Image (spheres, helix red, strand yellow):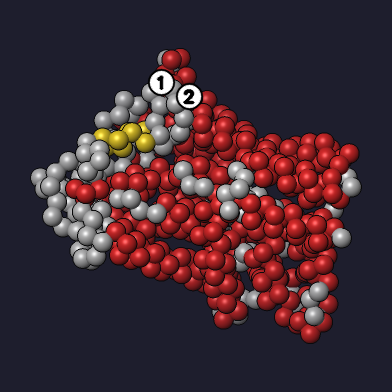
Amino acid sequence: MLTILGFAMIATFLVLIMLKKMSPIAALVLIPALFCVVVGKGAHLGDYVIDGVTSLAPTAAMLMFAIVYFGVMIDVGLFDPVVKGILRFCKADPLRIVVGTAVLAAIVSLDGDGSTTFMITVSAMYPLYKRLKMSMVVMTGVAAMANGVMNTLPWGGPTARAATALKLDASDIFVPMIPALATGLLFVFALAYVLGRRERKRLGVLTLDEALVEEPRTETVLVGGGAGAGAGVGVGVGVGKSTRSAGGSGTGGADLPGEPEGDGFQGLDPHRETLRPRLYWFNALLTAALLTAMIMEWLPIPVLFLLGAALALTVNFPQMPAQRARIAAHAENVLNVSGMVFAAAVFTGVLQGTGMVDHMAEWLVGNIPDGMGPHMALVTGVLSIPLTYFMSNDGFYFGILPVLAEAGQAHGVPAVEIARASIVGQPLHMSSPLVPAVYVLVGMAKVEFGDHTRFVVKWAAVTSLVVLGAGILFGTM
């Protein structure tokens, strides 16, 4: 019974948010509360919620201060050179912009943190997508899939969890999977190319002039979110005549006459008041030190971002009014993301507290045919796709993976092969409603979570299957 109710709760949640009948926050809170009562454990709802909130509180704190920190870094111009290089490549061509989104997300994902990746990627690419009227779900979908593949890095989380759960060395899991993961990343780039061509075709003969017709000089996009004095990061848009098409012609987009190629369309206003060029190397070294400390695990990640945010604000904006303005500028994103995390805590708390997630996992494992025993690596890879979407990584890797590994070992399948197969579901996992970082992505991109889900699920599942197929082809599982 709990198995049926668990699947019903998840299905109800997904249907309601995809049909936009409820907001994600409301659905994450009200749906599990209702099912908790149906299960007959309504009296324990408070305990389940507190347990869920307690387990996710460090994540919420990390996201809050990470948003402030990277928001300040964007404000002061740390990422302007990266943005400028990406925009020079993208020009005003939708195809290049989508491919550039995938490449940027993959590069930034090297730090192992999804929230960081999405904040930087959206901040850089959002102005281009908006001004050229491109599909925002293409941006969020491509970024999420690229980050999902890169999330398998040993310091990204899933690989380390699999190694811990099965008492293996993380390098033994990851290194043999590099060819398969590289294949998955190439598939994401190829998919970005196809989606970019579709966007170019949809936009037809759009020129840069037409993209700028509504607001030909400057638009302020609240990349940091929120209102308040000095809020937002300006999106400077060059003005000029252009006759080349941004789409359809395949020429690579339009440039503005009289300006260096690719510089006519600025992603971040080069004249915004928050720039701190004299402090560029301080901010660069601070960010490098922060990411190094995070990878080396010198301190808990929430503590690192708390210290980093405080230091960045103090050095870059020593005046109290300026500090308050920066905090206010990013307050909306902080509130939206932290609120979503605590709402997700209700969902996960009820799933785990009532025992629904355990019954669902036991049912799935118990229905594996005996004849599939020698192919448990393949079974694990297939199961990892839906299970890591509907469950937290902790729940899957520490609760389900040991059971699958034990079943595999009974049929002579090494635990390390089961561990490798378990990470192939990460491209889809990064768009799970239980992953806090995805709310940073959709929130900053101003995309409805249901729209993002409808678009990304099919492509992310295919990406996971490509990684799985490549792993089998290369003999790593």
On screen, residue 74 above or below 366:
above
Q: Residue at x 29, y 59 (%)?
A: 203
The residue tagged with tag 1: helix, strand or loop? loop
Packing grade of label 2 (10 A; few <14, some 14-19, many >=20) is many
Q: Residue at x 33, y 56 (%)?
A: 97
Q: Amino acid at mark 2?
A: Ala
Q: Residue at x 78, y 57 (%)?
A: 6
How far apart marks 1 and 2 lie (CA) works out to 7 Å
Residue 179 rendering spot, x and y as whole percentages: 52, 72
Which residue is at the front of the view, 448 or 397?
A: 448
Which residue is at the front of the view, 347 or 380?
A: 347
Q: Amino acid at mark 1?
A: Ala
Mark before the other along the chain sequence, 1 or 2: 1
Residue 16 rendering spot, x and y as whole percentages: 63, 51
The residue tagged with tag 2: helix, strand or loop? helix
Q: Which mark is residue 264?
A: none
On screen, residue 189 above or below 52:
below
Q: Which residue is mark 2?
A: 328
Residue 313 showing in the rendered view: no
Give the quarter of the figure containing the C terminus.
bottom right
Q: Residue at x 30, y 35 (%)?
A: 219
* Residue 142 left/right relative to 379: left
Residue pushed farthest left? 258
Residue 166 rendering spot, x and y as whole percentages: 76, 62
Determine contact: label 1, label 2, CB under 8 Å.
yes
Q: Which residue is mark 1?
A: 229
Which residue is at the front of the view, 104 or 169?
A: 104
Residue pushed farthest top? 320
